[in-house]
Image (spheres, rainbow, N blue to C red):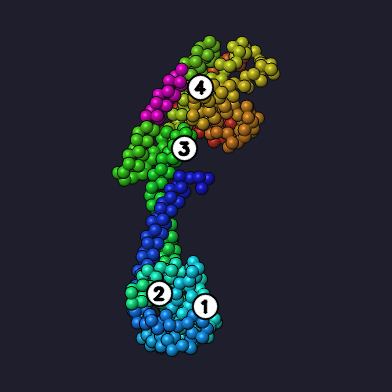
Amino acid sequence: MLFRSFRFKVTVLVILLMLLSGFIGNFFVYEYSLKAQMDQLRDKLMIIAQLIAKNVDSKELLGIPLTGEGVNTPQYKKIESELNKIRDVFPSIAYIYIMERTEKECVFKFIIDLHPDDAKIEPAPAKPGEEYDCTLYPEMMKAFSGPSADRSIVKDKWGVFLSGYAPIKDDAGNAIAILGIDMSASDVYNLQKEVKKRALLVLLLGIIFSVLLGTFISLRVTNPVKKLVEGTRHISEGNLEYRVKTGGSDEMSELADSFNKMTIKLSDARNELFNYFYRVAQTLVRVLEAKDQYTKGHSDRVADYAEKLAVEMGLPKKRTQILKEAALLHDIGKMGVETTILRKDSSLTAEEGDIIHKHPAIGEDILKPVSLDKDILAVIRGHHERYDGKGYPDKLKGDDINIMAAIVSVADAYDAMTSHRPYMKNLTKDEAIEQLKQNSGTQFNPKVVDAFVKVLQNTI
């Protein structure tokens, strides 16, 4: 459920957007920094390569035979000496080489190949005439047209280098060969590694910051929504007294205010509907009682007793009113019982008793579709339960019986005992009180009996 919640989705979305923004910003800063370094180094390489290339005598270069013996010619020795002098001026230059084209595509031939004096890694310097495949070095192939340099640092067994190239031209301005230099790029390479580390660190910190800030923002955004959802849940459960509190003056606060106004109108409408229904139900009960002169006014008296009892026991005013309404309707289930059984002036048969015992459940079924108050339904269904568990319809016992149902049970029994019935002589108030005391703890809740005795002795 967590992963499907609106809050989770908003949190993830905010975090992803912040991460994306941070990643893009970090990426561009990183790329700009590296590009600036590379561009600076490439420009330096092209300038140096072009400067060296201009100092190579093209005529002497052309005089070097492209064979293994070419390294022993005066022309080779002279150019080699000049190049070594230049390398002394630029100690960062490790390798210098001169190559010319061949008829094969992407294949050059070495004319001169100079390695550092301390180079101990094989292979040895290439001999004049040895071929070299430059497929992997597109910038090298461009060098016949003008100065160029590789676009990325190469790390191999010889070290970390960046190469630059420039054309060597004859007196007529034609490119007859290219000169290449491999400059050590360890410092730049290490700097790039450091920049990458810092970029990863910044990204990690950005992730942590994004998670924290994203969570904070999502909570600010979704908290009002969560409160509205909570309010909707309360309404769906019938609690129209619930109000949403968001604070502030933004659109969510206005929505919450509208929600509360809607809830108030729904509550008013429900109360009006319930009042109408209860008046109708009470009328039906009175019609039912009016058919029997011995039960006429019974529900009104029970409601009056129950109200006084509730006040004596300290029930809140709202629950006392609910109790009175429930007491007025406690026998509505008898509408589902045949009149001949209700008006019978002799003892009921076992079968007739079973039918009578169904009237609490029938009453609950009548009210359940329109009554959302669980206490009213509990009174209707439970007013014939006994404290010892021998009542009906659910045989509830002790404190499992709703206290409001227990109050109506005592009030109902007292009125039945003190009212004239054709099959039973009515008792006096004192006799009825004695009966209540005798059945306290078995049929009736002792606390309710004690409270009702006080009511009867003081007010009735």
Chief SS of the magenta region: helix
Residue 286 image position (x, y, % from top left): 49, 15
Residue 274 falls within the magenta-colored stretch:
yes
Which residue in the protein does label 1 denote? 130
Q: Is residue 83 left or right of residue 397?
A: left
Q: Type of residue at label 4? A: Leu
Camera-near label (4 vs 1) is 1
The foreground one among 345 and 142 is 142
Q: Secondary structure at mark 1?
A: loop
Q: Which mark is residue 176?
A: 2
**Residue 158 higher or lower than 218, as above or below:** below
**Could you tell me how far apart the alpha carbons at marks 4 and 2 are, in whole angstroms?**
115 Å
Q: CA distance from mark 4 to mark 3?
A: 29 Å
Question: What type is the residue that disc 3 sits on?
Answer: Arg
Q: Earlier in the sequence, mark 4 or mark 1?
A: 1
- What is the crowding at mark 1: few (fewer than 14 residues within 10 Å), some, or many (at least 20)? some
Q: Which mark is residue 233?
A: 3
Separation of marks 2 and 3 at Cα, in angstroms: 86 Å
Evaluate if marks 4 and 1 touch, with contact meaning CB atoms under 8 Å apart.
no
Badge nearest the viewer, 1 or 3: 1
Residue 245 lies, in percent from the top left, at 37, 42
Q: Count neighbours of disc 2 (C-alpha within 10 A) and say few if under 14, some if 14 to 19, many if 20 or more.
A: some
Q: Residue at x 52, y 14 (%)?
A: 289
| Above/below status of 436 relative to 230 | above
Q: Earlier in the sequence, mark 1 or mark 3?
A: 1
The kind of residue on which mark 1 rests is Glu
